Image: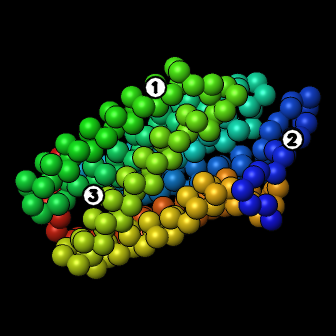
Amino acid sequence: MLIGEDYDKIKVTIFDLQLLEPNVFITDVIMAFISIVIAYKLYQIRKTGSFYNNWYLFFLIFGISSFAGGIGHLMFYYFGVWGKFFTWITGIQCIYYIEKAMISIHPMQGKQRTFMRLSRIKLLLVYLIFGWICLTQPIHEKPGLAFLPIAFNTIFGVILSAGVLGYSYSKTIHKDFRFIYLGVLIMVPSAVFFLMKINIHPWFDKNDISHILMTVGILYFYLGIKKLSDKKVKLALNT
């Protein structure tokens, strides 16, 4: 185990291709596959309202983004930092869809409008900070600098929407919302492993741990959404 610093990245050569971090590619693909399958399962119920539609959009874009992220890691020698941009940009948008889904069913219209306005302001602010870092900082030498606003946006966005609102809805709307906030609780340690650089093994580093925890977390999200749909829980489905 290595804490506070990273193992040397794994490098493999296949058919003269120099591939980097195949371990991260594998866990990214697992996460992407599961997300796309969930999006497929939500395809029909997405038409029933904003809550389901925004969760469908989250899983669809998150799945595509995760696969692109895996390619960005694997083909870093060829694409460099540019291979990460698609995942970074779509990653910000994914969190917005979670926020929009959870806010759309808030029972108090005044708070709903306020929360939605704050979510849009945060979305714009994160993109502006991300753009400023990309234009002014040495991201080609230190790609992690560009990822910082995305990481913090993910942490706070998911905790406040799926976590806090999910817990509140489990008490006021239906108990099955508990699966959504439990998904957040499962995901939270991934931020600790990633930011503190806790690496178990070169083939199972902080990225892999984060991906596995996030995959389990989104499965809990889906479990909650599916149960609410199956039980036809009455939701204030606003657009």
Q: Which residue is mark 2?
A: 11
Q: Residue at x 89, y 41 (%)?
A: 12
Mark 2: few, some, or many residues within 10 Å (few <14, many ≥20)?
A: few
Give the colouring mode of the picture. Answer: rainbow
Residue 226 horizontal/vertical position (percent)? 37, 67
The residue positioned 78% from the left and 28% from the top of the image is 77
Which residue is denoted by mark 1 in the rendering? 131
Residue at 46% over, 25% down:
132
Question: How many C-alpha atoms fall within 10 Å of the one at disc 3: few (<14), some, or many (≥20)?
Answer: many
Look at label 2 and name its amino acid.
Lys
Please tell me whether mark 3 or mark 1 is closer to you in this view.
1
Identify the amino acid type marked 3.
Answer: Met
Q: Which quarter of the image is occupied by the N terminus?
A: bottom right
Q: Which residue is mark 3?
A: 102
Would you say residue 230 is visible in this rendering? no
Q: Secondary structure at mark 2?
A: strand
Residue at disc 3, secondary structure: helix
* Rendered image quadrant of residue 232: bottom left
